Amino acid sequence: MPNSDISGTESPDLQVLWHGSQIQEWAKATLQGPTPSLARSAVPVVTELREIPGGPFTPRIAGGSASYGHQGLRERLAQLYEASAENILLAQGASQANFLIAGALLEQGGTAVVESPVYEPVLRGIEMLADRVMRLPRRAERNYQPDPRELAGLLTADTKLVWLTNLHNPTQTALEMDHFAALVAACDKVGAQLIVDEVYLNFIQPDFRAHAFTHGAISVNSLDKTWGLDQLRVGWAVAPAKVVERAYKFNNLMGVVQPYVTEDLADQILRSEAALSWFQLRRNTACGQMRLLMAFLKSTPELKLLPPSGGVNACLQLPGSLNDMQFSERLRTERGVTVFPGSLFELPGYIRVSIGGDPVEVRQHLTILGEAVREWR
């Protein structure tokens, strides 16, 4: 698998129709403990609708056509982005939204450019659809900002899409806006679309009008990471109307009809100012726990922080003698603490820790993490 210092290389084995997702298979096999430990990369899950102010929010099994998404939810998201309903693609999570948009853009084949380090499942999906996948490194020496000049060197007339994350997953680095404008301009020059997965961006920028769609790119988001509504499985993309139309036609081969009940709940919740204020308070509370990690690192110099721009996640560099995959497995099985190995994101030698959960458990598990690093280094 390509790593973060590879530029302009193709993903291997594209003659194979599809590859499974190592990170998803690892997570589903591993994250089965009684608590999230240090591995839930999001705010805490909302377990009951009655927790949310502004209700009651009522599940309705039917109430209108959802053939191409819940019309009310499309209109509400359009309001939030200052777009039109025709710009809104609804999907069952951000991963599906990414896949459907990629399918729309790669309908007739072509080349895709995907960042590295990367959230691997989206890379695997794009590999299924593209004739060729090129990798754009987000380098440590550039603070994980993509280089517009390097991107321009990868783009050709055959390039249909460029895919990035903001905040970058896994490093949680925010895209700098001067870089962003140059990235959009480079894509425009060859007729490619820039797709930006923004599932973590609401941690630092809750105003959707400041997201990528406003600046000439395609925005992808969901009610998962910064909302805690994982189980609704509601995601979306905000894109040119013709791209959205093709994406819905692509989905006729798979999802066919959108789930009315979850999209209707999402519509109800997103129309409640009391609910929106409550979700922002939850974000602020979760992000505020980054102070726990900062205090821990002061007493644990063996771990080096890769500074995030915000949110509840951070990547920590292990001492050179430790293998991140082996360390993470041993930490889980021997000490009951779970972290994500950086190798699953093409970031070997690092672990990703998440501190948005119960603060008592976060402190306890950070302490155990520090003890393990000192003992096993």
Image (cartoon, helix red, strand yellow):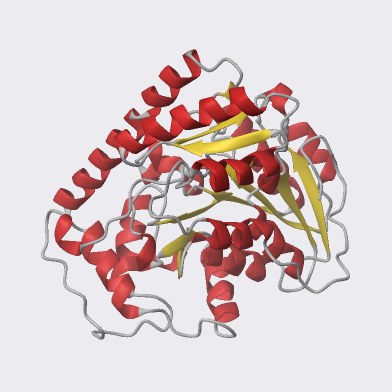
**Along the line of sight, the residue nearer the viewer: 191 or 375:** 375
Q: Is 188 drawn above or below residue 242 in the view shown?
A: above
Find residue 133 and report its horizontal and vertical position in percent: 80, 56
Q: Is 179 drawn above or below residue 48 in the view shown?
A: above
Residue 117 seen in the current view: no
Query: From the viewer's perspective, is 330 left or right of 189?
Result: left
Could you say which quadrant of the image residue 6 lies in?
A: top right
Q: Is 43 drawn above or below residue 30 in the view shown?
A: above
State the residue at coordinates (38%, 55%): 34
State the residue at coordinates (11%, 65%): 56
State the residue at coordinates (33%, 51%): 227
Number of numbered tags placed on the structure image? 0
**Along the line of sight, the residue nearer the viewer: 24 or 81:** 24
Query: From the viewer's perspective, is 114 left or right of 246?
Result: right
State the residue at coordinates (25%, 46%): 279
Query: From the viewer's perspective, is 356 left or right of 104?
Result: left
Could you say which quadrant of the image residue 330 lies in?
A: top right
Find residue 119 and report its horizontal and vertical position in percent: 63, 50
Find residue 350 and report its horizontal and vertical position in percent: 65, 34
**Along the line of sight, the residue nearer the viewer: 326 or 334:** 334
